[in-house]
Amino acid sequence: MKRRQNITREVRDGWVRKFEKLNKQSRLYYSFITTQDIKSMGSKSRTPDFEERGQDRDLLSTNERMFFYRLRFSKKFVSIKEQYPLLPLERVIGVAKQLGVRYPTYPYSRSVEVVMTSDFVCKTLSGKLVVYSIKDTKAFKNLSEAQRKNLDNKLKIEKAFWESKGATWYLILSEQIKTIFAQNLEQLFPSCSLTVKLQIFHPRWLQLFSNGLSYKKQRLSELVTAIALELGISYQESVEICQFCIWNKHIKANLSSIKLRYELSLEQLGCEVNRG
């Protein structure tokens, strides 16, 4: 756990060296800030990344966790790094000077400059960096004038730093995140990959599902049950394959406006097999 008071430049620089060493030595990503290091206004969690074996994610709020599911579902990124530091520090401080804003320092630290972090730094297939800063709308509105000015300065520095590196930077507020779509992704994400056993059943399962779409009035649970009986697998295993297919876009469903519930009909959920 990183200390919260009496931070010296030696302590801060030690954190940076540890971060760089861990990420140089491991195939996994180690975030600069972990769930143990900081108090969070939301529900922080160390969340398994089911798309990347052995990788856990340090997500410091419900907003970050929900947005992470969106990043994974988009399939746009080959790399997603949370709580990523803005380095080298000298360059970031230089950006602040160019902007004419005060660079943040650690509290009670005799003006030791903070290592700023971005919530998500992502890399596309083409190598382009896309950076996201996540903020809670209610908390943002409840800040005092001085707190809001400090936050605005940090966001200006963060945005300018990443744009100077050719990255695209976005500020995302919680009202854009806490949606039915996000709830559905949270339900689906643990099923983003299949066991070897279920991979064998997957092609036949999808064919049977496609055949069953001729009767759109039936409940999703009825079709999933019928397929389970046909294949000789459990209902839960059939559900796993169904959710895998939706997550990986083998099956289209209306995830944006209706909660994915198995008692709803295929028609209500807008279920279709993706022929592409």
Image: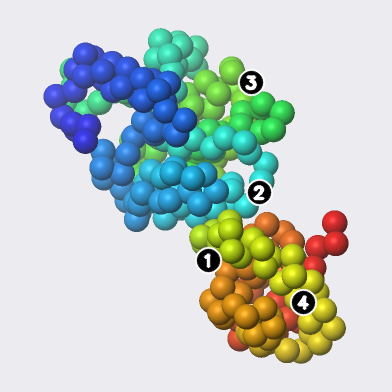
- Residue at label 2? 74
Labels 1 and 2: the sequence-earlier one = 2
Label 3 and label 4: CA atoms lie apart by 47 Å
| Applied colour scheme | rainbow
Left or right of residue 130, residue 100 in this image: left
Mark 1 or mark 4, which is nearer to you?
Answer: 4
From this view, report whether residue 84 is shown above or below residue 142: above
- Residue at label 4? 208
Mark 3 or mark 2, which is nearer to you?
Answer: 2
Image position, residue 136 (x, y; %): 44, 50
Q: Are marks 4 and 2 in contact (CB under 8 Å)?
A: no
Residue for point 44% across, 33% down = 29
Please state which of residues 96 and 229 is positioned toward the viewer in this rendering: 229
Q: Quadrant of residue 172?
A: top right
Label 3 and label 2: CA atoms lie apart by 21 Å
Secondary structure of the residue carrying numbered label 4? helix
Count up the numbered dots. Answer: 4
Labels 3 and 4: the sequence-earlier one = 3
Label 1 and label 2: CA atoms lie apart by 16 Å
